[in-house]
Amino acid sequence: MLCLLTAAALLPACGGGTTSQTSIICSDPNVCVANEAVQSTPTGPNTTEIVVDQGPAGGFALGVTNLPYVTVTVCSPGSASHCVTIDHVLLDTGSYGLRLLKSKVGALALPAVPVAANSNGTPAGDAAECYAFVLGAVWGPLATADVRIGGETAAGLNIQLIDDDAAAARPIPQNCRDAAQGPLLDSVTKLQSNGILGLGMVAVDCGLICLDNTYAGSYVVYYSCPLGGAACMPAGMPIASQVQNPVTRFAVNNNGTMIAMPAVPDLGAIVARGRLVFGIGTQSNNQLPAAATIYQVDANPNSANYLYVDLKVGPRSYPQSFIDTGSNAFFFDDATLSRTCSVSSGQQGHWYCPATPWRQSVTLTDAAGTSGSFNIAVANADTLFNGGATAFATLGGTAGQATQTFSLGLPFYYGRKVFTSVWGQTLALNGPWYAF
């Protein structure tokens, strides 16, 4: 559930090179950050590295902060050699499917996903999609590819190619621009990555509501773009043609993920390295710890709290809350927290800057009534950004979400192993869950 705010331009990294040991660097006695924090296990063919750093090459106008990246390899269907490897793909457990800047895979000439004409008014053509996040949206065609992540392969996977041409290959529907509620994310600079790897808790990115082209109560997600260059039209999209969660297409380790991130100091780390592990309970390296608690999300699609859990922070409840690597901070609304930050004129008023760290005990209650508590902290964003780090466990802000929403973003993952199951797969046949 991509929700990213940018910081002021970050200070250059200082200190030594890559090391498996955490070393502390101080710009003054009160501002100390880790050079590199590393979680080096689990390892194995069902794993790959997560890195939080200053992001991909692209000349950002504003700094990149707290974004977890992975590397993926994309191949023409059936080919073992006609491939490209793409780094700095944003890992997002709140969305579904792989979305890459079209220019990154242009040499592969990936086949389009066809759309058949049907009685709901869908014209025949090639599939395109508008996919909206909390902030911004992406637009572009669908394609089929073989996708490799670590030692896992999802063959014949439907992915989205984010149209990053100087002039879009097809006119972008106004409905998509409206759905974005902000910018269309159509470049490395705007996306802050080379793509998005959505490994959330369902198998496809839209599901039943996209089977016809009425899109009642929602923006239009799928389009059919007729051959010959005619304008793209709203389309009903069969489940098998929608963008797919790669995890569900793996041979064995296909029922969810585990993310293990290192702990970082209060003022952060210049680089943090963790592990993305595929499968839950399928290998010796992805077993649920005996002490872990499973939290079921609301699995009723007619509920206002669908796919959410409830968080209580102090006297206040946030019934539409979620855990999400695609959010680069704790995002929530609290009028008592100071926003008098100077970090960026473009984002001023969004980050929290309390005079002293705001520390709270949080109670999470799931749809089945199971509860558990843990502690979080939000530090002054100016202090964090001025220390030169990119990985923060204490960054918080408001992203204009509903007042009943609390996003436990990447800060929540530091120092934890967090499991996310996929609905319909083994261990989550009746609904998905988190565990930690």
Image (cartoon, rainbow, N blue to C red):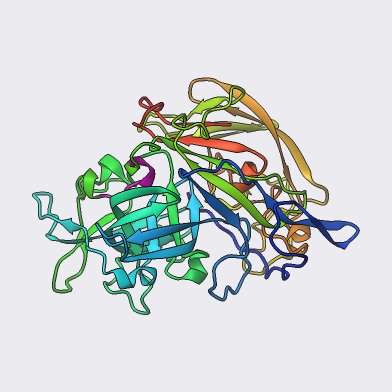
**Which x, y percent locates residue 298?**
44, 29
Res. 400 in view:
no
247 inside magenta stretch: yes
In the rendering, at what x and y percent does residue 28 appear?
89, 62
* In-image side of 155 versus 404 (left or right): left
Can you see residue 246?
yes
Q: Residue at x 67, y 63 (%)?
A: 348
The magenta span reads: 242-248
Q: Is residue 258 magenta?
A: no
Residue at the bottom extreme, as displayed: 166
Image quarter of the C terminus: top right
Expressed as whole percent of the image width and height from the top left, the position of residue 234 reads 22, 57
- How many numbered callouts? 0
Q: Quadrant of residue 79?
A: bottom left
* Front residue of 212 and 101: 101
At which x and y percent is residue 369? 53, 20
Relative height, residue 196 to residue 1 (above, below): below
Q: Nearer the viewer, residue 57 or 213?
A: 57
Give 7 or 280, whichever is nearer the viewer: 280
Q: Residue furthest top?
A: 369
Pick the front one: 365 or 175? 365
Q: Is residue 148 found left or right of 171 in the rendered image?
A: right
